[in-house]
Image: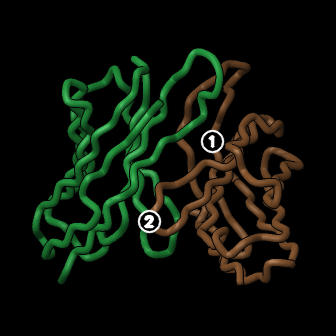
Amino acid sequence: ETGVTQTPRHLVMGMTNKKSLKCEQHLGHNAMYWYKQSAKKPLELMFVYSLEERVENNSVPSRFSPECPNSSHLFLHLHTLQPEDSALYLCASSQDFNGGLAVIETQYFGPGTRLLVL
Amino acid sequence: AQKVTQAQTEISVVEKEDVTLDCVYETRDTTYYLFWYKQPPSGELVFLIRRNSFDEQNEISGRYSWNFQKSTSSFNFTITASQVVDSAVYFCALYPVISSGSARQLTFGSGTQLTVLP
């Protein structure tokens, strides 16, 4: 199943670097999500985009900047990260609206980008 | 606020044993969805099942079965005749249907690491 893909799968960056994570969904969904998964912590929702509009920002530091150019693509731009930002970053997608009606559909996840900040 | 508790941090079983993963949740919402996801070492969260709060029927899918009990706020997951390939982290998650405000928060438990030994 390659419904949601993420690149790169692994990333090592210094604190002064700028990098971007990419997510692409091939499921025809209209909502996309970024999650952070740190060791020994529950998954944390970072951002939600529905119909390409950001609808959720869970108090994420400004060094993380999302971008959703269309319903199939989602980016997470990273700059001046800290070592504690090292984690697995997961992208997910779901169908948020169906024929104009809000629906609740299952979120499908990508394989994640394992990020290490030195 | 929502909360999902998976009290079992790690479980080890020998192949062919049955194993039950516990999930207890808290929510004030009368309508909600419950999910189970599997996360193998590759990192991707794989969707297993979704159940809404009005459907308390137990479900069986091959070697997997789920026991939803609203009276005890539990949604337990049983693997029958476990196999080595079942080794993974399993997450239980809750999605409340909120009439206003943010309705896109999938609240995850902290996960249970299942190891099936040959």
Type of residue at label 1? Ser
Quick one: B18 or B76, which is closer to the camera? B76
Image coords of residue B101 (percent x, y):
65, 22
Chain identity of mark 1? A
Q: Quadrant of residue A15?
A: bottom right
Residue under the image location 87 percent in, 73 percent down: A18
- Mark closer to the chain start, 2 or 1: 2
**In what element is the residue under mark 1?**
strand
Residue under the image location 23 percent in, 54 percent down: B21
Type of residue at label 2? Lys
* Residue labelled with disc 1: A94
Q: CA distance from mark 2 to mark 1?
A: 26 Å
Say if B96 sits above or below B22 in the image.
Answer: above
Supply the letter of whichever chain is brown. Answer: A
Image coords of residue A56 (percent x, y):
71, 37
Chain identity of mark 2? A
Residue under the image location 67 percent in, 53 percent down: A34
- Quadrant occupied by the C terminus of chain B: bottom left
Residue A40, numbered label: 2
Colour used to depict chain B in the structure image:
green
- Is disc 1 surrounded by few (<14), some (14 to 19) or many (20+) residues within 10 Å? many
Residue under the image location 67 percent in, 75 percent down: A83
Residue A46, numbered label: none
